[in-house]
Every structure is written in structure tokens, then in C-alpha cells.
Image (cartoon, rainbow, N blue to C red):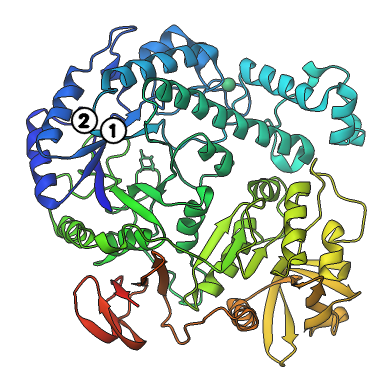
Amino acid sequence: MKIGVDYYPEQWDKSLWEKDADLMSKTGVKVVRLAEFAWSRLEPREGEFDFAWLDEVMRIFARYRIDVVMSIPTNCPPLWLYRKHPEIIQKGPDGSPIQTGIRGHRCINSEVFMSYARRITERMVRHYSSSAQVIAWQIDNELEAYQCTCDTCRKKFRDWLIDKHDSIANINAAFGNSVWSLEYSDISEVEPPTAYPKAWQNPALCLEFQRFSSECTAKYVKELAMIIKREIPKANLTTNTWFCENTPDFYELFDQVDFVSYDNYPPVMLPADPDEFYSHAFHLDLMRGIKGKKFWVMEQLSGPTGSWAPMTQTPRPGQIMGYSLQAIAHGADTVVHFRWRTAVSGAEMHWHGLIDHSNVPGRRFNEFAELCNTVGKLGLIESTEIVSDIAIIYCPENDWAFKIQPQTEGFYYLEQLKYFHSAFSRYGANIDIVPADADLSHYKVVVAPTMYVYDRKSAENIYRYAINGGTLILTNRSGVKDSNNNCIMQPLPTVYKELVGAEVTEYDPIGNNNQTIVDFAGNRFSCSQWCDILTLTTAKAYAEYDDGFYRCCPAVTMNRYCNGVVYYVGTICEMDFYESFAGNVMRQTGIPRLKGLPAGVEVTTRTNGIDEFICFFNNSEENAEISLPKAMFSILTGVGKDKVTLKPFGFDIVRK
Ligand code: GLA
Ligand code: ZN
């Protein structure tokens, strides 16, 4: 396990390089990410390449035994390239070019851009192909499913549609274009749905454009990945990601590379109300689930963030260290902090690194040094893995379709997953977040929230899991759309009806209004956003509504299907419901529960098949104490104890 930093030597006077490397080495930094945005320094004029400065930086780091993640700087083409080929500039929603002068304004579908991107990639890879110091390669930066509207993208989108649907007639049928006289008579009439708000566009067209854009991004990564692998077959490839408005399909994106990298900026301020929903651990589990293996954090919170928005508060004592260790507890094996020193120029100068503008290492830096030292003691858990009894299914298409057509006020796809994640986390359970076509057979519980857009393979996988005896949790807004994003003309939850053993006879999209449900044991919970009014066929009611005209109608059900048990949660509740429900499901399925965990304390368990190591992270501003069933040794302090005490954002690992 390693700690690293993002370093931009091109932004600093040469005289600082050696001093920085020296301090990094003394602090325990093992890896630096370089060259991410440095295209204009690496190819200052067309076809003239200059690696001398980077070689010098590499030599310095080599002397200090610091490894390198080399980045392909294609996010930021030099301005000479835009001037020579303005056609490579991305076009905005209305078709006009995005103004250059920031970053990321290249169109990744432009053949001209790609010829330059291929060349700089080839040059860099050839230049460093024999360097053992380069332990990984990063392709571009924070790629999105760009919704570019340039002529090339328009043409590609049209070709993509014809390729997929074969004919204009099929496209018209798939899109249901008889509505509003939208029938195409020629493929040239197809436009990307960007000029008006999505709400006014055809949802079928919007989803296809999103799929197309995501596929283009994955193809782009694949093309650069192939260039790198051709030169260095053993190269360890990644690209770094985050949750942007326009997320590509992570499964497809990372299929092209060797490991997942995540840019991890947990919010510094916790919600004022401890009951208010917060699940940062969810994002980390999702990253681990993309490839079902350990991942890297390529950028980690290091100071107050800002620049794009007013600055946030500075990380509280314990957060620099705690949030890095939290990432490790959820499956990161290298955490690279963004960034070594805060930029003194450029748009990003208020997004703070470990060292402030003054270049005087301070409180946050000292905590970082302590982190490096702590991570040095984690050798024992190096080859351990996170094995989970519980999985939650994440489907990019459901997320996209929800963004295209918001359901009710406050109802977001990802939040549905987080409610369950948070509930199971309160009992200290490991949780995997997996694609809908993952092998589910070894999970005791699978939650498939809001399976909104139908996909045959996913539905079959879910059925198979229940048939073979799994415990499945489905929720409202499942089976609503066919794969074209049109509504299915059957009682909801359509394709999942048999599993659920109940039908939705009516629904009430209540948004921010409240309803109440009462469960089989008489517990009452408030709910909002959405209420499915259910009629039972083979299921039994787990909870019923307690207000208004559908009082006494089932809201949550339980059904036996073949060897499995299927729950259906037809509404969206306050956290107490999910916690109580998760507790019951865990008891039914024999998953061990840690009871009485203090609020904010997260527990994950890592195992190497022989030993188990339990990680405790206190994600709260209060001290926390957790009693252990027997005395266990802390691998951080070497002390045996029967309780773990943690300061705010404190962390410990014990051997079970
Ligand atoms: C993103 C980018 C970084 C930097 C940070 C902070 O994560 O990848 O280059 O811009 O945001 O703003
Ligand atoms: Zn384009």
C-alpha cells in the first residue's frame, strides 16, 4: 500500500524540483503522478518534442526512489493545435464552439485531434518504454460522456443509429416518433438532443445519445490504451474518474484499462443533523465494484477546495489522514493526494494541496506525514480482500434515464442505492456494488433498486439469483421502461411482477409531501417522493400505508419465489425504516450484525482467507468507542484491547 502525490513540475521553478523530491522522500511519499496537463511543454511546436525537462524530473525522483504514474496529457491540447485546427474544438449544446482558454475542450471524435493525440501518446510511450520507474499510465483526465455537437459527432451519431437500428423506419418505431410529428424521413434530420432542456426532448433519443456519447469515450480510451500496450505490453493502465453530471458507463470505460482510479474529494463538512443522509463510503465501494478488484485513488482531498465555487472550509484535524485510510479500508491500495503544493497561478489556485502557497508545510502536511508513516505499517493487510455477503446493483442506464426524466422532487437514482448502503453499513457489513450482469450466486442478499430501464440479461440474472434461493430486494420504478426508454404497456413492475408477487394498481408521486407506513410489527415510518399502491397476488404485506385514501394498502411486500425470497419496497422512506428493514433481512439471512455502532462509525472487514482484519473509521466529529467481543490486537499500535476508541475521523485496524 502506497501514498503518493500529484505533482506538476512544469508549474514550478526548476530549483524546487530536488527540494520537493527530498521532502517527499523524507515524508514517505512513494509515487508521483506527472505530466497530466503538460502537452504544451512536451510538444511546444508541432512535431517538436521535448522530453529533456521531464527526464530530469524523473532522474531526480529516481534518486529518491519515488515511482511515477505517467499521464497522457490529451486533456489539454496546446493552443497552437486549436489555432491550426479549430475544427477539433468541442461544440456546445447550441452548436457553437466552446471557447478555448480552460481545459478539456477537445472533441475526442475528431480524427484530426486523434492523429495528434496518437502521436503524443506514441512519443511518450516510446520515450519511457524501458523505464521501470513508471509503474502505471493514466490516460487523459476525468473523462466524461461528452455531448459534443460538432459536425463529426453529429455524423457519427447518425451512423451509430443506423448501424444499431438498420433503417429510418426502425429508428422512428424505436423512438415512437409519431408523437409531435417527429418522424424522420432521412437520417440527416437526426439532431443531438442538446439544444433545449431534456424535459422537452424525446427520452428515447436522449438515452440513445447518452449511450452513444459514453461509448465514444470508452472507444477513445481503448484506442489510446492499445497504443500504450503495443509499445509496452505489460503497462499498467488506468484513467481517473469522478461523479460528474455526465458520467460515462464506468463498466465500459474501465473495461479498456487495468485498474480503476477515483478522484476522491469527500465533503469536509458533515451534515449538521446526524440523521441527515451521508454516504461517502458508497462511492468508494462503487469504485471497487467496477472491476471487482482493488482500485487507486488518483486524487485525494488535501486542503480547502475551491476555484470553481467559493472555497470550502479547511479539512478538520484527522480528515486528511482519516479519509485516505477510509479509502484503503474500502479497497484502495494506493492513494495519491491532490496535490503536493497549491498552485500559485492559473484558475485552480484556490483548490489547495498539502502545502499552501507560502510553501511552508503546516498542520495538514504534518498530518499527511503521519498518514505516510501509518500506511507503512499496513503490510499485513496488503494481500487481503473485501468479501461481502451483500451486493447492491448499480446500472448506469437507470441513472441516465432518471436524469433525462426526473420522477418527483427529491427522487434521484443514486440516492436509492445509498439508502440501502447506508442501512447495511450501520451494522458493520461489507457491501459490494456490482453491475446487473455480475455473478450474484455468492451473495446472501442482493438489492436491485429502481430497475427502471429493461435489459434482458440483467432481468434474467436477477431472476436466476432468486430462483437459486437468493434474497432479493426490489424497489419502486422497476420495469417501467423498455430498452428504448419507452413505457411498457403492462401493470408495473411489468417484467418483475412474478418475482414480486404483487402489482402496482396505482401510484402517487408525492414528491416532498409525506405519507406514513406501518410495518408488520407496528413500527411507523414516514415516507415521501413516491408511493406504489400494491395489490398482492402471492406476496404478503411487510408494511402498509397509514394515511389517506390508500390507507391499509401494501407498501412493502415479501414473496417466496422458487427457492428465493423477494422483497419489494414500493415507497421511499426515512433512514430509520431502511435500518430496521436491513436489520430484519440480515437476521433472516444469517448475516452477522454489529449492534450499537456509534453514529458515523464505519466498519469494513478484509480477509486473506486465514486472518481477518477489521477496519474502524470514525466519520464524525465526536469521539467514539466500540466494544469488541474479545481482546484484539491493533495492527497500528500493536496494543491488544477489548474496545476501540477513536478520535474524530480516527481510524484503527484490529486483527480478529
Ligand atoms: C479534478 C481534476 C484535477 C483538479 C481537481 C481539483 O479532480 O482531475 O485536475 O482540477 O479536480 O480542481
Ligand atoms: Zn465533436
In the rendered image, the residue lying farthest to the front is: 610
Q: Position of residue 263 (x, y in %)?
A: 40, 47
Give the CA separation, mark 1 to mark 2.
10 Å
Residue indicated by mark 2: 11
Task: Please identify the quarter of the rendering in which residue 104 is found.
Answer: top left
Q: What residue appears at the point 21 percent right and 27 percent down from the top-left corner?
A: 10
- Residue 247 against residue 220 in the figure, above or below: below
Q: Earlier in the sequence, mark 1 or mark 2?
A: 2
Q: Which mark is residue 346?
A: 1
Q: Position of residue 228 (x, y in %)?
A: 40, 24
- Residue 176 against residue 315 in the figure, above or below: above
What amino acid type is highlighted by mark number 1?
Gly
In this rendered view, identify the residue nearer to me: 533 or 437.
437
Is the shortest distance between ligand 1 and the CB of mark 2 under 8 Å?
Answer: no
Residue 455 visible in the displayed image: no
Q: Position of residue 1 (x, y in %)?
A: 28, 53
